[in-house]
Image (cartoon, rainbow, N blue to C red):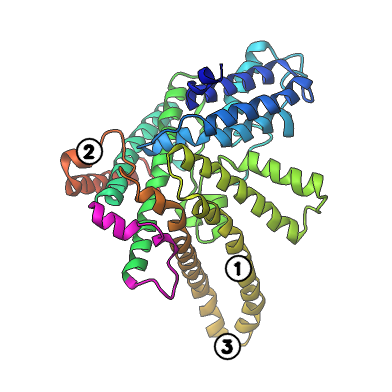
Amino acid sequence: MLFALDNISNGNWEDIRTVVCILILVTTKKGSIVRLACIPVFTAILYLQLWGSSTSASTPFQVSSEGRSLGNYLHHLNLLVLIGVDLKTDATHSLWSRLKSAVFYYAFNLRGIGTVHQTKNIPELPRYFRGKSNPKYEFILRQVTIGFWEYLVADLGLSLLRRLSDERRSRYYGAGEEWISWTDGTAAQWRLRFLATLVFWPTLKVALDIGHRFGSALLTATSMTSMSEWPPMFGSITSAYKLRNFWGKFWHQFPRWSLTSYSNLITREWLRIPKQSLFGRYLNNAIVFALSGAVHLAANWKSNIFDGDVGCCLFYLSFVVGYIIEDFIQHIWNSGKGRMIGTLSPSAMKKSYSVLPYLEKAVAVAWVLGFLTIVTPWWIYPYLRQQPVLTVPYSFVDTFGMTNMLSSAGLGAVFLYQVFEARP
């Protein structure tokens, strides 16, 4: 019997748990004993997912799929137990309406779009759609076109990261290279860290966004959902000039709802820490990032990467330290800025008010880039030294060449900017 369970794939276990979650949402009320019984059952399924047969994911889409087990486990228990979504109390809701809500508004809606639990700072639909005579058609066309371009960019980024000989890969990304310090790292090593970071984050962004683009186009085309239920997955890169903004406004918010529920349970319900407490604020951050690290650690294990556990955890927890440093420096600067400007002449004061915001933004961007350059290799170097390195299912770069595809991506970016008003 146990042997038979071990032969069930990670994806099949995921489907089983999701279906069970949907059925329980539809048929039970908040606080039901059936929901509480799901805790050990879902935990047993998670155990079989994480410690069953491992896989060797070769694409970012497989890594995302294989690594979703812990994240979805936390999401499902959040729906059933922590916040206790109740679709059955209102007798006016038919079985079909409850089923549709359970599927589209809760089980697969990690950001809570269109519900009272919607995550903060979700981007609005682009202004491009305002005033369009057929916005649904425009939405589908825009999503599909951008999705194809993002696939090409992901292909380019992954090709840049993997097109190295075994000797150079070992020298650049070898064991321990992620841990170099300011004192023992060479200029070449730090330059490589910066370039790897600069290529990795845009590549990861578009790789994650592709499924969102095509999925939203398909479900909107079939009228199963409306375009209003598909706000952008990512915010504007122009908002990522602080570490808090990077995660809170620019990056996707998929795990935020469920992870925040768990952190609030610990800090407010169990520890009774006041909501406005500074310590509680940072403890909440620490819990959310620790859980996020655990979620991504599961992706490592399912990708057969076992030498990146410490780096993955430290990468996410490092942002708590980054937040503290950022908040402290910002507090000191804001406290002294007014007094400093007050000592200037009227003309100099006027000039400072026009120049200072740009200077502050430039320093903030440098801070974010510098911090990411230090900590990103802790997480990604174990992936980059893997053989084979992650790739896309079909590589246009391998077929048509790097130069041709770089030109195509550049022309595509101009086309998207001019025709669809797409912005980074």
Q: Secondary structure at mark 2?
A: helix
Residue 306 in the figure: left or right of residue 319: left
Cα distance between the residues tagged 2 and 1 = 43 Å
Q: Amino acid at mark 3?
A: Ser
Residue 17 in the figure: left or right of residue 386: right
- Decide which of 174, 289 is in the foreground and name it: 174
Q: Amino acid at mark 1?
A: Ile
Find residue 396 and name its label: 2
Which of discs 1 and 3 lies nearer the camera? The answer is 1
Q: Secondary structure at mark 3?
A: loop
On the image, the x and y values in percent for residue 321 come to: 60, 63
On the image, the x and y values in percent for residue 119 come to: 62, 41
Q: Residue furthest top?
A: 95
Decide whether residue 178 is among the magenta residues. Answer: yes
Of callouts 2 and 1, the N-terminal one: 1
Q: Which residues are magenta?
A: 165-187
Label 1 sits on residue: 325
Q: Residue at x 45, y 63 (%)?
A: 179
Label 3 sits on residue: 345
Q: Residue at x 38, y 44 (%)?
A: 421
Q: Is residue 110 visible?
A: no
Cα distance between the residues tagged 1 and 3 = 32 Å
Which of discs 3 and 2 lies nearer the camera? The answer is 2
Q: Amino acid at mark 2?
A: Phe
